[in-house]
Each structure stands twice: as structure tokens, then as C-alpha cells.
Amino acid sequence: MNLKDFIRSIPDYPKKGILFRDITTLIKNEKAFSEAIDQIVERSKKMKFTKIAAIESRGFVFASAVSYILKKPFIMLRKKDKLPADVHSVDFELEYGKATIEVHKDSINEKDSILIIDDLIATGGTAHAAAKLVEISKGKVAGFIFVINLFDLNGSYSLIKKGYRVENLIEFPGH
């Protein structure tokens, strides 16, 4: 099954000049969604990790299913002010703005090796912020798995350059 066939491309969203790669068409198809989860599970077997983290919000869709299958704890990396307890925070740049993500301080410790899952990587700003959250929590990043890599925006490359392991299911050019 070619998962690329299940990704819808929407021009000029969220702003003019961006070609948005929409995963909702993949997740609404039970066979394509199952295939994506199976592929993530297979790729995750190449990594040694104790917990799975995902970046809000589309990463939650994939990571929670993988967490259930692998029987690993699931950590939510959320937007600013969405978590109720004490948090670590990281500010970062997006392709089209600025943002902050947070994790509960008691979610990750020095014994944890974290697999980070998200739906897409573009320039890598969010992924680098997620790695920083894991590291300031004293955990180790086991690696990243993305459903989509926008390869010419170099986000995956920037993670690899920093020594992180990166896997993706499909690739598209970024616009």
C-alpha cells in the first residue's frame, strides 16, 4: 500500500505559499491508518526506548495507537498552558510563527529513553523543541519517527546532524 496516495495536499493553507500535507485522509481510511501504525511499530523495533512521546496534536493520533500496541507509557508534549501540573517549557520557531511546548516535570526522568512520534517534519523546529524537552527532563531521545518528511526543508537532516536517529514513512517536497 502506498501511503502517499492517502495524503491530501491543500494549497495556501495555513497561509499563502504553503502546500499543506493533510493526514486526515489517511487516518479516516482504516486500512491506510492500520498500515501507517504497523509501519511505525516496525520501525520502532530498531530503537531501544522506555516511553513514547508525541507532539500535539496530530502526533497523538499515531503515538497513542503505537503506545497501546507496544505496551509503552505515552507522554504528551503539549502547547503552552494545556498541562495542569508543573511543567518544563521550550520556546521555538515554526515555519510561520513562534510557539511553546511543554511536558509535565514528572513524565520523564534520567532512566527514560524516549521515542518521539509526530505526523510531519518540515524545518524541524518543533522536533528540536521536543528533543530539548526530553533532555531538560533528564531523559534521552531514542529517536524520531514521522509519518511525513518534507525532505527539502531539511528538518530530518538537522536532527540527524545533531546525532538523533530519524525514520519516516513517506516523503514529499515542501513548499
Image: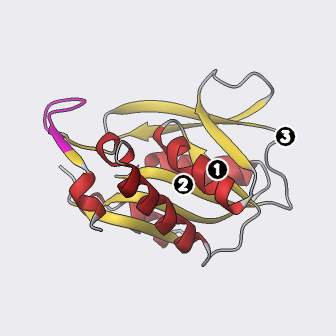
Q: Earlier in the sequence, mark 3 or mark 1?
A: 1
Residue shown at 20%/59% (left/top)?
A: 173
Q: Secondary structure at mark 3?
A: loop
In magenta segment, residue 99: no
Q: x%, y% of residue 139?
A: 77, 57
Question: Residue 2: which disc?
Answer: none
Q: Quadrant of residue 22?
A: top left
Kindly identify which numbered label has been placed on residue 117. Answer: 2
Q: Which residue is mark 3?
A: 106
Residue at figure coordinates x 58%, y 35% from the top left: 101
Q: At label 1, which amino acid type do we have?
A: Ala
Question: Magenta span has 10?
Answer: yes
Tag 1 near tag 2, CB within 8 Å: yes
Q: Give coordinates of residue 67: x percent, y percent.
A: 66, 54
* Outermost residue toward the front in this view: 30
Within 10 angstroms of label 3, few (less than 14), some, or many (20 or more) residues?
Answer: few
Task: Tell me the CA gap for discs 3 and 1.
Answer: 13 Å
Q: Quadrant of residue 23?
A: top left
Disc 1 crowd rating (10 Å Cα; few below 14, some 14-19, many 20+) is many
Question: How dense is the environment of label 2, judged by Cα within 10 Å: few (below 14), some, or many (20 and up)?
Answer: many
Quarter-wise, where is residue 17 in the image?
A: top left
Q: Can residue 163 be seen by looking at this rendering?
A: no
With respect to residue 38, does 91 lie above or below? above
